Amino acid sequence: MTITESAALATPHRRPLRRTYLMCEPSHFTVDYRINPWMHPSEPTDTALALEQWRSLRQVFLSLGHQVELIEPAAGLPDMVYAANGGFTLGGVAYSARFAHAERADEGPLYASWFADNGFEVADATEINEGEGDFLLVGDVILAGHGFRSSTRSHDEVAQVFGREVVALELVDPRFYHLDTAIAVLDPVTPASGEANIAYLPGAFSDASRRILEERYPDAILVSDEDAVWLGLNSISDGYNVVIASRATGFEAQLRARGYNPIGVDLSELLKGGGGVKCCTLELRR
């Protein structure tokens, strides 16, 4: 069965929605500095393999009927492939990124320029944030991560820019330094059924933030550390098809039990930089 055929067989409760994504080819991918626990500059990287894996991911999105737009990669910015960190878009407005580490600082203006050139109104951030890495839209609410990369002051800025409720969640495990490594949004819009629409790793959050998640999403999928360490939660869902790390087999089984269609991909080379499916994918909401 092809991916397209599987999408057509969605259950009445799970319907795929066409999405538009921004991606950046990893033409300059390598690991020559360390700004997260996954990165080890002493270990070799294979740019050709990273390109092959990235192109396979892009093809999965296209096969599912999604639109993929591209930003030109820049030499000297090996992490630019992780497009999710380039900003956060909603209703034709793009909130720009201001990176926590100097090694990635030049990515922010490049993404902001792309947004402006492609029809978005750009809201220039004054506070440190790493875009959709730490801002996740769940229905009408924006979940916002802090603890490692994005400032809590950026949460206030996002609330002002978009006029949405912003829920702050504190990350405490350095392996899961962005919110999108610890939470997967399974339904891009609020499901009419009222069913759970996120999955998360409880241990990635402070006690207070875990209580917030338990209260707001009592039926959420709780993912194991064994699946999270492959960045299994760093996934992309269209409401039915969920593109995940192929090694996150336990999460795959949990998704199938809830009526989703998990599609595993291998991004093992890009994992060396601390990124997965979602990290490579920024949703464009015009």
Image (cartoon, rainbow, N blue to C red):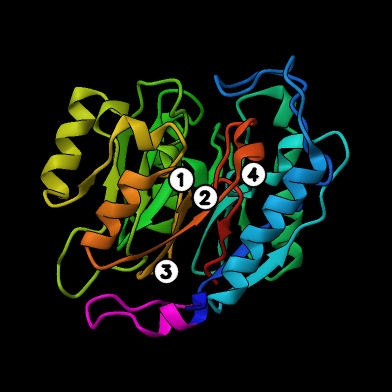
- Looking at the rendered image, the disc whose residue lies closer to the viewer, 1 or 4, is 1
Where residue 177 appears, as percent x and y from the top left, is: 47, 28
Q: How far apart are marks 1 and 4 (CA)?
A: 11 Å
Amino acid type assigned to the residue bearing label 1 in the image: Asn
Q: Distance between the residues labelled 3 and 2?
A: 12 Å
Q: Distance between the residues labelled 1 and 2?
A: 5 Å
Secondary structure beneath disc 4? Answer: loop
**133 falls in the magenta region:** no
Q: Distance between the residues labelled 4 and 2?
A: 8 Å
Secondary structure beneath disc 3? Answer: loop
**Disc 3 + disc 1, Cβ < 8 Å:** no
Label of residue 234 in the image = 1
Q: Mark 2 points at which residue?
A: 278
Where residue 199 appears, as percent x and y from the top left, is: 28, 48
Residue 165 in view, yes or no: yes
Secondary structure beneath disc 1? Answer: loop
Q: Residues within 10 Å of mark 1 (few under 14, many from 20)?
A: many
Amino acid type assigned to the residue bearing label 4 in the image: Tyr
**Disc 1 + disc 2, Cβ < 8 Å:** yes
Amino acid type assigned to the residue bearing label 2 in the image: Lys
Q: Residues within 10 Å of mark 3 (few under 14, many from 20)?
A: many
